[in-house]
Amino acid sequence: MKQQNLHTPDGVRDIYSAEYRKKNELENKLQKVFALYGYHNVQTPMFEYFDVFGKEVGTIPSKELYKFFDREGNTLVLRPDITPSIARMATTLYDTEKLPIRLCYKGNTFINHSSYRGRLHETTQAGAELIGLDSVEADAEMVAMAVESLKEVGLGEFQIHIGNVEFFESFIAETGLDKEEELKLREFISNRNYFGVEELLQNANTKETTKAAFQILPELIGGVEILREAKKYALNFRTIEALKRLEALYDLLTAYGVEKYVTFDLSMSGTYGYYTGIIFRGYTYGTGDAIVKGGRYDHLLEKFGKASPSIGFVIVVDELLNAFARQKLSIPYKNKNTFILYDANRQAEAIKLAKEFRANGKPTELVLKREDKKIEEYISCAKQNLCVSMMYLRNTNDIEMVNLLTGTGKSVSKTIK
């Protein structure tokens, strides 16, 4: 029988040593970009009442939520998505009818994936939300900030795929399908099963113009020229307006200088039901999922009692970390810990030296040498603890100094006064 207390449950893992420092470095750089754009850090609870993520809100299915009860019998859930928590908080703590509100955050989310083996159930997200603006300028700011965030952490090869829920929904509205058939159609499109789409629409006696539009849908992926091509298949005024919004967005992204990172994908429908307009995903090599997920959610705050247009995105830090590992990209991180080893008769000197180092902002580990252990064992330990240098205060009043990065060292005769 497996001893469970020595292992983590499926879908979660321990992060430590160099990997933790790399992850922390990525998070700090992302937060730096958010701050440069004028976004303010907030923190929401790790668990909320069930209704914050219920079906009416449009987040993930109930069966994929981690649910539990408080003492009063209320159903609580570990948050699967931070955006609804931000929406709840904004409606209660901010006046969303005055100036736009720019908020950013980082935190863990929890999804009990039932059909995707190998995916993490707990992931770290860093994100930003712009509340109170329904404008293409706000759309452009969010996409540009997502691009600048990925560039800041050192990722070079990536693309932001942009669609518009209104464009996709205008196609759906013309099919005349019932709810069950519509769900099947969405699933076919999500899985790029366009043979299934064709058969479903054929059996439903959908209009020929609508079927033709769906046949061209998988080809509507590419540069800004795709938007002009898509106008030939516009089914209604809603479709035209969605394409105009994307064209205006592209002009602004060109002004930001990030247009080369943009790909338009008009088959995008949005993971969450609360998306209403522009949606976007960021992709790079070596990941099984998008590293950026974002979009406009103009009606989400209404679910919490206050109407306000909004747009936001998250960067999935764990997927980003995977991308760096698989692309063999380095993540430089600050590593300046000093390891002070001392013999028993020099304890007072070692403590004083460590206090001086710490007072000057130098992280310092202090270790008493055991007689049955060799100095090489402590050098190995110091390297494992990511220290960059080691000082050994010998009982002979010598101090042996070792550069753990180069392996070089020297010995000096010195007493710490």
Image (tube, rainbow, N blue to C red):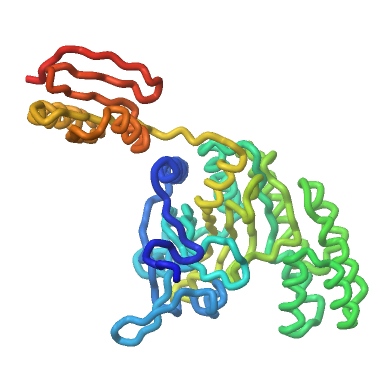
Q: Tell me which residue sits at (32%, 81%) in the image.
A: 70
Q: Tell me which residue sits at (50%, 63%) in the image.
A: 11
Extreme right residue here? Answer: 208
Specify the quadrant that holds the C terminus.
top left
Front in this rendered view, residue 372 or 22: 372
Above or below 54: residue 84: above
Which image quadrant is residue 77 in? bottom left
Front in this rendered view, residue 389 or 399: 399
x, y (%) of residue 261?
Answer: 67, 42
Specify the quadrant that holds the N terminus.
bottom left
x, y (%) of residue 124?
Answer: 46, 56
x, y (%) of residue 357?
Answer: 19, 28
Which image quadrant is residue 293 in? bottom right
Front in this rendered view, residue 243 or 338: 338
Front in this rendered view, residue 150 or 238: 150
Left or right relative to 222: residue 350 = left
Q: Tell me which residue sits at (62%, 36%) in the image.
A: 156
Q: Is residue 285 visible?
A: yes
Which image quadrant is residue 252 in? top right
Left or right relative to 360: residue 47 = right
Q: Tell me which residue sits at (54%, 59%) in the image.
A: 311
Left or right relative to 375: residue 32 = right
Q: Is residue 36 visible?
A: no
The total number of labels drawn is 0
Above or below 409: residue 141: below
